[in-house]
Amino acid sequence: MKIIRCKSDLRQLTDAWTRAGEIIGVVPTMGALHAGHLSLVTTAKAQCNRVIVTLFVNPRQFTNPEDLANYPRTEDSDAVKLAPFNVDVLYIPDPSEMYPAGFATSISVSGVSAGLCGGARPGHFDGVTTVVAKLLLQTAGDAAFFGEKDFQQLQVVKRLALDLDLKTKIIGCPTIREDDGLAMSSRNLRLGEAARKLAPQVYVELSQTAAAIEQGASVPQELARASAALSAAGFGPIDYLELRSAANLAPLTHPDQPARLFVAAWLDGVRLIDNVAVG
Ligand code: PAF
């Protein structure tokens, strides 16, 4: 696995691969790799001739400077974790490579970015779409792999690729969970011992609420019940707990189409997000 930090070095490789007709897969990450990321790498390896993992803690998608400062940075151990996967390149651009002096462009996707994390973290998705567009262009990716844990991000990136005629096919992959159900996330590393024990309750509540809605329970009543249960268990604040269309993320009060239940809840100063399918 080559570690590349400079986009012109990366371009030399990807140009040669493209000329040879090879399919390039990209797994964009912010590092602190866990089994969720590694499952994306496995899927990319199965579908593509070449795989590039990108590692860039993107300052533009953080709405809170403290969150950016606290984001785990584990470059060396990330490289060790990737070693068995025969990835071709680990691309670790410098912030100055990504956002050189004078950088003045921001990409904004409307519609699917409204509400949920877009509402709770204004500007977050503009940061995501701007960096993802750059990474997909820099890597010349034919396919890019994103986890469904960030389901709204996945829909936003799909819209971005479609609207900007990017050649990259955006592929969503299932959420990977710990044995106790907690969705894998780099942020889990910041949970204290007691909070880590409590954290799987998010998935428990989501699953129970999804099952109740599928069995015909009132959506507003179920959401209120689950929200109260999470607060009583020690979560707070709860940024959102909502049922939305799986296709376009429109808010739903009846599960009359394939839907997803979304939650973002704080615990021990850490913002946990998760979602499950309904119907
Ligand atoms: O999901 C993430 O880790 C980030 O939002 C991404 C897609 C790598 C963009 O910085």
Image (cartoon, grey):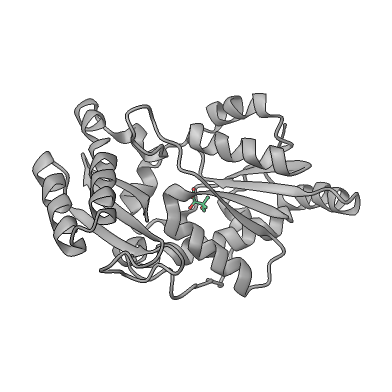
Query: With respect to residue 85, does 149 lie above or below?
Result: below
Can you give x and y, in whole percent of width and height, for residue 182 in the image? 33, 36
Taking the image as shown, residue 176 lies to the left or right of residue 16, namely left
Q: Is residue 157 visible?
A: yes
Q: In which quarter of the image is residue 218?
A: bottom left
Q: Quadrant of the C terminus?
A: bottom left
The residue most toward the left is: 232
Considering every residue shown, the one lying at the far front of the view is 215
Q: Where is residue 174 in the image (x, y as percent from the top left)?
A: 49, 44
Which residue shows up at 33% across the image and 49% down it?
273
**Left of 180 or right of it: where is 139?**
right
Picture residue at 69% right of the left edge, 43% below the top:
52
User: In the image shown, does 70 or 133 lie closer to the viewer?
Assistant: 133
Out of 100 and 193, give the one closest to the viewer: 193
Quarter occupied by the N terminus: top right
Q: How many labels does the image show?
A: 0
Residue located farthest toward the right when viewing the structure as drawn: 20
| Residue 234 in the figure: left or right of residue 39 | left
Residue at left 57%, top 26%? 81
Query: What percent of the width, then of the height, locates residue 239?
Result: 23, 57
| Residue 4 visible, this orientation | no
Quarter of the figure with residue 251? bottom left
- In this image, 138 relative to 175: left or right? right
In depth, the one of 175 and 163 nearer the eye is 175
Q: Quadrant of residue 142?
A: bottom right
- Measuring from the top left, give residue 33's x and y in whole percent: 51, 34
- Residue drawn at x 21%, y 42% is 267
